[in-house]
Image (cartoon, grey):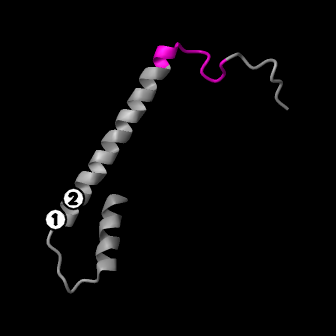
Amino acid sequence: MIDKEKIPKGYPTHKHQADFWEHLGRTVATFGYLEDALVKGIYVFEVMTKRDKKVNNEKGFEDWNNKLNI
């Protein structure tokens, strides 16, 4: 059982200033943006590589997916 009366106001962010949480949120968002940009870049380079037309597209997709999941 949790006694809601004993939980501090603003829990769980009550121990730090609002500026800290703002900067942390911006940092996390920036890493998310960078991750998205890297995935798009990897995708573009992989798509631009020449492929043997005899190779099954499903196999090519699996190979590409495996490269991303290293």
Measured Cα–Cα span from mark 2 to mark 1: 6 Å
Image quarter hosting the C terminus: bottom left
The amino acid marked with disc number 1 is Met
Q: Position of residue 19 (x, y in %)?
A: 46, 15
Q: Does 43 appear in magenta?
A: no
Residue that label 1 marks: 48
The amino acid marked with disc number 2 is Val
Compared to residue 24, the image places residue 19 above or below, namely above
Q: Identify the residue at horizontal 33%, vertical 59% (top origin).
A: 68
Most extreme residue toward the left is 50
Q: What predominant SS class does the magenta segment belong to?
A: loop
Compared to residue 43, the image places residue 51 above or below, namely below
Q: Identify the residue at horizontal 85%, vertical 32% (top origin).
A: 1
Q: Position of residue 9 (x, y in %)?
A: 70, 16
Q: Residues within 10 Å of mark 2 (few under 14, many from 20)?
A: few
Q: Quadrant of residue 27?
A: top left
Residue that label 2 marks: 44
Q: Which residues are magenta?
A: 10-20
Q: Position of residue 12 (x, y in %)?
A: 64, 24
Q: Residues within 10 Å of mark 1 (few under 14, many from 20)?
A: few
- SS assignment at label 1: helix
Labelled pair 2, 1 in contact (Cβ < 8 Å): yes
In the depicted view, which residue is nearer to us: 41 or 64? Answer: 41
Compared to residue 23, the image places residue 29 above or below, namely below
Q: Position of residue 54 (x, y in %)?
A: 21, 86
Q: Does 13 appear in magenta?
A: yes
In the depicted view, which residue is nearer to us: 69 or 33? Answer: 33
Compared to residue 56, the image places residue 69 above or below, namely above
Most extreme residue toward the top is 17
Q: Identify the residue at horizontal 21%, vertical 58% (top origin).
A: 44
- SS assignment at label 2: helix
